[in-house]
C-alpha cells in the first residue's frame, strides 16, 4: 500500500513538474505595462504645448496627468515579475523538493542578457557616433554590472536611448537575491520578508526626503522601488486564498487603479515644465504600487476574450524587447516625423510604436529565441512556450 501511495505521489509531482504554468492574460497585461511607459516617453507633458494648440487649461492638465501616469507601468512590471518568479519557484520547490539555484540563474541569464548586453553595446557605440548621444563609460560599466540604476543615483541621467535599462538592473538585483531567501524559507517567513521590504522602502524614502537628496537618488534607488516587488511576492504566496472576482469587480479594480495612477501623477508633479518632489514621491509611491497590484489582481484569472487576443498575446510575448528598444525607436521617429501639433505628435508616436514593434519582433525571433529554447532545458516548471 505504501509503495502505491509513494508511486502516486511521484506521479503527481511529475505531472506538476511537466505542466506548463502560463497565464495568457498576464502577457496581455505585460504589453499594457509597456504601452504606459511608451506613452509617458512619447506624449508631450508641458502646458505650453497644449496652450499653443488651443487646448483648455483643465484639459491640458488632465492630458498631462493621464500621459504621465504611464510611467507607473514600471511598477506594474515589477509586480508582475515578482509574482511570476515567486510562483514559478514555489511550484518548482513543491514539485522537486528544492530550488535549483544554478538552473534559475542560467534561465535568467539566457532570458535577459542576450538582448540587454547587445543593446548596451549598441548604445555605447551610438554615443561615439551620434553627437547628441552621451553615454560615458561609467554608465556602461554600471549597466554591465547590472547596477545601471545606481549609476543614475550617483551621476544623474545619461543622454541616451539606453535610459530605460535602469529597471532591468533593479529586476536583476531582485532575481539575484530572492531565490536565496525562497530556497528554504517557509511561507510565513517569506511573507515576513516581503512585509519587511515594504517597511524598508517607506522608511528609506522618508529618510531621503528629510535629507533633501536630488530626485534621482529617490526615483532610481533600488530600496525605494521595492513596494510593487514586495506586494507581487505577497500575491504569489497567498493567491490560492484569493476569491474569484466577478467582471464588475475586475472593472472596478482596474478603473480605480488607473484613476489612482492619474491622481498621484497630478499630485506628484508640479510646475511647467514638470518637476518632481521627493516628499510627494514618498507619499505617492505606495499608492501607485498598490494600484499596480490591484491591476494585476483585476487581470489574474480573467477569461475575457480581449485578454486572449492573439495579436495582444504576441505583443506581450515580445514586451521585453518592446521595453528595451522603444526609446531608440522614438529617437528614430523624432527624426522621421517633425512634431509641431497634436496631430503630428500622434503621427510621430505611431511611427515610433510601429518601429518598436518591428525591432522587438526581429530581436525576439533572431536574437532571443535561440537562447529561450536553450533556457527551457534548465526549467523544472515550464512556463510560456517560445
Image: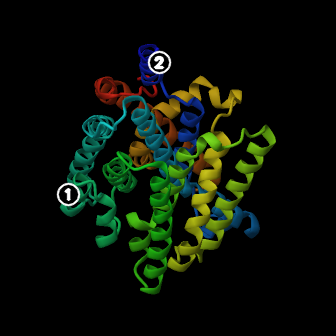
Most extreme residue toward the front is 1
Label 2 crowd bin: few (<14), some (14–19), many (20+), radius 10 Å: few
Q: Position of residue 25 (x, y in %)?
A: 60, 33
Query: What residue do we see at 64% from left, 31% from top?
Result: 307
Query: What residue do we see at 38% from left, 73% from top?
Result: 217
Residue 54 in view, yes or no: no
Q: What residue did someone put label 2 on?
A: 5
Q: CA distance from mark 1 to mark 2?
A: 55 Å
Closer to viewer: mark 1 or mark 2: 2
Q: Is residue 323 left or right of residue 306?
A: left
Q: Is residue 83 left or right of residue 106?
A: right
Residue 217 in view, yes or no: yes
Comparing 114 with 136, the one in front is 114
Q: Is residue 44 left or right of residue 376?
A: right
Q: What residue did someone put label 1 on?
A: 141
Q: Position of residue 71 (x, y in %)?
A: 54, 57
Comparing 215 with 250, the one in front is 250
Label annotation for residue 154: none
Query: What residue do we see at 68% from left, 55% from top?
Result: 257
Q: Position of residue 271 (x, y in %)?
A: 59, 77
Amino acid at each position: 500500500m505504501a509503495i502505491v501511495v509513494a508511486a502516486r505521489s511521484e506521479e503527481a509531482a511529475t505531472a506538476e513538474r511537466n505542466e506548463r504554468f502560463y497565464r495568457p492574460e498576464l502577457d496581455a497585461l505585460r504589453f499594457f505595462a509597456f504601452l504606459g511607459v511608451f506613452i509617458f516617453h512619447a506624449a508631450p507633458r508641458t502646458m505650453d504645448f497644449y496652450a499653443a494648440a488651443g487646448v483648455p487649461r483643465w484639459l491640458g492638465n488632465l492630458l498631462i496627468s493621464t500621459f504621465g501616469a504611464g510611467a507607473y507601468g514600471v511598477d506594474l512590471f515589477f509586480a508582475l515579475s515578482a509574482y511570476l518568479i515567486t510562483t514559478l519557484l514555489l511550484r518548482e520547490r513543491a514539485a522537486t523538493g528544492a530550488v535549483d539555484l544554478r538552473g534559475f540563474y542560467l534561465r535568467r541569464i539566457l532570458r535577459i542578457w542576450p538582448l540587454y548586453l547587445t543593446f548596451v553595446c549598441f548604445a555605447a557605440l551610438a554615443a561615439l557616433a551620434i553627437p547628441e548621444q552621451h553615454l560615458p563609460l561609467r554608465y556602461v560599466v554600471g549597466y554591465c554590472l547590472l547596477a545601471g540604476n545606481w549609476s543614475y543615483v550617483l551621476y544623474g541621467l545619461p543622454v541616451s536611448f539606453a535610459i530605460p535599462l535602469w529597471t532591468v538592473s533593479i529586476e536583476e538585483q531582485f532575481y539575484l537575491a530572492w531565490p536565496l531567501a525562497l530556497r528554504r524559507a517557509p511561507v510565513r517567513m517569506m511573507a515576513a520578508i516581503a512585509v519587511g521590504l515594504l517597511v524598508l522602502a517607506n522608511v528609506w524614502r522618508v529618510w531621503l526626503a528629510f535629507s533633501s537628496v536630488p530626485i534621482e537618488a529617490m526615483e532610481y534607488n533600488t530600496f525605494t522601488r521595492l513596494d510593487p516587488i514586495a506586494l507581487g511576492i505577497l500575491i504569489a504566496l497567498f493567491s490560492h486564498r484569493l476569491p474569484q472576482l466577478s467582471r464588475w469587480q475586475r472593472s472596478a479594480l482596474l478603473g480605480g487603479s488607473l484613476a489612482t495612477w492619474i491622481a498621484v501623477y497630478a499630485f506628484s508633479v508640479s510646475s511647467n515644465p514638470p518637476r518632481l518632489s521627493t516628499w510627494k514621491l514618498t507619499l505617492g509611491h505606495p499608492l501607485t504600487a498598490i494600484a499596480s497590484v490591484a491591476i494585476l489582481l483585476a487581470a489574474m484569472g480573467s477569461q475575457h476574450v480581449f485578454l486572449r487576443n492573439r495579436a495582444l498575446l504576441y505583443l506581450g510575448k515580445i514586451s521585453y524587447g518592446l521595453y528595451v528598444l522603444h526609446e531608440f525607436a522614438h529617437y528614430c521617429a523624432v527624426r522621421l516625423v517633425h512634431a509641431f501639433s497634436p496631430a503630428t505628435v500622434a503621427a510621430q508616436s505611431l511611427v515610433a510604436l510601429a518601429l518598436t514593434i518591428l525591432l522587438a519582433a526581429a530581436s525576439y525571433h533572431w536574437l532571443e529565441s535561440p537562447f529561450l529554447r536553450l533556457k527551457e532545458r534548465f526549467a523544472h516548471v515550464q512556463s510560456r512556450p517560445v
